[in-house]
Image (spheres, rainbow, N blue to C red):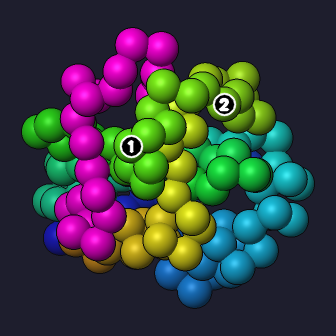
Amino acid sequence: MKYTHYYSPMDEIITNIDTDILYNDIIKNFKNYWSSVNTAYAEIHYFEDEESIATLIINVHLDYGIYLRHESNEEKLSVFDKNKLDEIVWTKDVCDISMGLFLPPELAWKGIKEFLETGTASTEIEWISPDDIPEGGNY
C-alpha cells in the first residue's frame, strides 16, 4: 500500500493530504500562508508497504520561492538559476540556502504533486547533486 505523511509547518502530521488543500495553502496563498506559520519548512514522506521510500523537503523564502530537496537512494536539489548558486539567502528558519535553488511556487508545485503521487523527483524540474553547489553556496 502506498501513502504519504505531510509534516506541516504547523507541527501536524497529515496522512494522504488532499492535493487541492495543499495547493491552496502552500501555493495559491503562498505569501499569506508562509507568513502566518512559525517555520518555512515542511516535509513529505512517501511510503510503500510501511517502508519509507523517499522524502521531499520543502523550504520557503517569501521573495525567492520554494526550494525542494528529494532524498531517496541519492540526494537531489531543485535548481532554477545556476548562476546564483553561490549567493546565499536566509530563510525564516535562519537557514542559509543558495538563491539559485529556489523555484517559482507554480513550478515547485509540479514537483510536490508528482512526489505525492509517485514518490519520485519530477522530470519537469531541473535537479542537481549537492556536489554541484559551489564554494560559498549552501543547501
Q: Which residue is mark 2?
A: 89
Is disc 2 placed on a helix, strand or loop?
strand
Q: Which residue is mark 1?
A: 82
What span is in magenta?
Answer: 120-139
Q: Amino acid at mark 1?
A: Lys
Residue 68 position in % (x across, y down):
44, 49
Please tell me how crowded label 2 is: few (under 14), some (14-19), or many (20+) other residues with Cα within 10 Å.
some
Mark whose residue sits in front, 1 or 2: 1
Q: Amino acid at mark 2?
A: Val
| Residue at image location 32% in from the left, 64% down from the top | 125
Q: Residue farthest to the bottom?
A: 20
Q: Is residue 31 visible?
A: yes
| Residue at image location 48% in from the left, 14% down from the top | 136
Q: Earlier in the sequence, mark 1 or mark 2?
A: 1
Quick check: 107 left or right of 10?
Answer: left
Residue 79 position in % (x across, y down):
39, 49
Q: Is residue 3 visible?
A: no
81 relative to 115, above or below: above
